[in-house]
Image: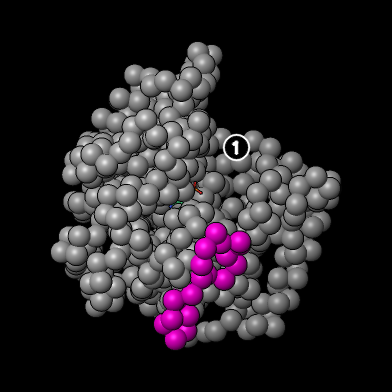
Amino acid sequence: MRTVDRLRLNALLHDEDTKFLLEHPRSHALYQRACRSMQGGVPMLWMIRWAGTFPIFGKEAHGAHFTDLDGHSYIDFCLGDTGAMTGHSPKATLETIKAQAGRGITYMLPTEDAIWVGEELQRRFGLPFWQFTLTATDANRFALRMARHITDRPKILVFNYCYHGSVDETFMTLDEEGTPRPRRGNIGPPINPVETTKVIEFNDIPALETSLSAKDVAVVLAEPVMTNIGIIHPEPGFLQALREITRQTGTLLILDETHTLCAGPGGYTQKHDLRPDFLTCGKSLAGGIPAGVYGFSQEVADTFWAKLEIDQSDVGGIGGTLAGNALSIAAMRATLEHVLTPAMYDRCEKLADRYEMGIKQAIKELDLPWIVTRLGLRVEYWFRQTPPRNGGEANAAIDSELDRFMHLWALNRGILMTPFHNMALIAADTSEADVDHHTITFRDALQALIG
Ligand SMILES: Cc1ncc(COP(=O)(O)O)c(C=O)c1O
């Protein structure tokens, strides 16, 4: 099998940086201006991590495409890192947003749409009670609080290299010796997460048994398939073991479906008939309007209610003035009713098949030791020969230089990939021509790399 020549890679990266700079003069000028009013020249810190030497400035986005202020058009496989999995501004959501905005945006009162959404979430995910937030981060934070309140246990457990949003206590990893440590880059933690959080590898049943046997863990927070260090599937029996061991030890289980909603209309949970105590989700649920949800079982609801001081509930650490606002809820109803439908998933799955097949063929033809993993509408290539079993293995396979080259090569040819991954997401209006353009561009990148 062929390997990538690092000198060649460096030279190619240099050429791509030059091309990027030459072709984005307006974004460059705006970035320089932005640096004078926003730290790092971006509205949110992580936006400095795009593959170019500065971010491109967006102009408009429709469906699976957008344009930048330099006049380039792009096929969007990033889709706001899942926030726009519906495609940008889907028609039904957009019309509802316009109508609802004319009737008021936030009144701090329930609307009838909220009941419709609650009932739909019951149907999709199988949990009876639902609450609304503005982000998936908050959904996770509030579910964690409820779990601690119910169990009176101090700790949580997460999997190595998970990501569940900016939830303080989740930023834990295992070092090379397997010792739990705060994750690198953890900014100003309120307390050392070693004190709050146990961390083990995904797919490690013995470690799970040992960690939960002390009965000091309130809740396990997990994606049913890891997606944020790349797609890592559970091995056969792992999710069943996770459910059994949590039940045996009186530990609650939160499944975070924020990304795995790409597996089907009811996420991985519905598809595989999983029975978590809590389920959290966000990002695409309202077509890009901020919205998150968390649902829980009858048993959780009853125990929580019995321990709740209703007259103090506004200062209990679960809240958000704008949470459950009329606009987010109306957008969620329209998106669930008309956009994230079984028909949409069927159509996009076929395109994801085409995307997957295209990149697999190119990898095979050019004889590189890379593989492709897949979850529903999400497809990802890896610079390793076997699928990783866990976050530690996945992290070891990261090749930042090669990542940056693949992303920048694609960007310079009108394709936006999800940052921090080699992942593509298919949207409702991605076309076969979009997928084929990506396949050709990807194959050309590989050809350039091996010379
Ligand atoms: C699995 C998962 N959960 C939660 C979140 C948090 O989403 P948000 O940043 O919208 O709060 C993310 C963000 O990437 C995520 O990947």
* Residue 236 location (% of width, % of height): 21, 69
Residue at 55% across / 84% down in the picture?
3
- Which image quadrant for residue 442? bottom right
Residue at 50% across / 58% down in the picture?
168
Instruction: Please name the predominant secondary structure of the magenta segment in the image.
Output: loop
Tell me if residue 186 is in the magenta stretch. Answer: yes
* Residue 98 location (% of width, % of height): 52, 19
Residue for badge 1 = 61
What is the basis of the colouring in this image? one colour
Name the residue at the top extreme.
Answer: 103
Tell me if residue 290 is in the magenta stretch. Answer: no
Q: Is residue 21 above or below residue 212?
A: above
Q: Is residue 296 above or below residue 159?
A: above
* Residue 315 location (% of width, % of height): 45, 37
Q: Amino acid at mark 1?
A: Ala
Residue at 33% across / 32% down in the picture?
310
The magenta stretch is 174-192
* Residue 234 location (% of width, % of height): 28, 66
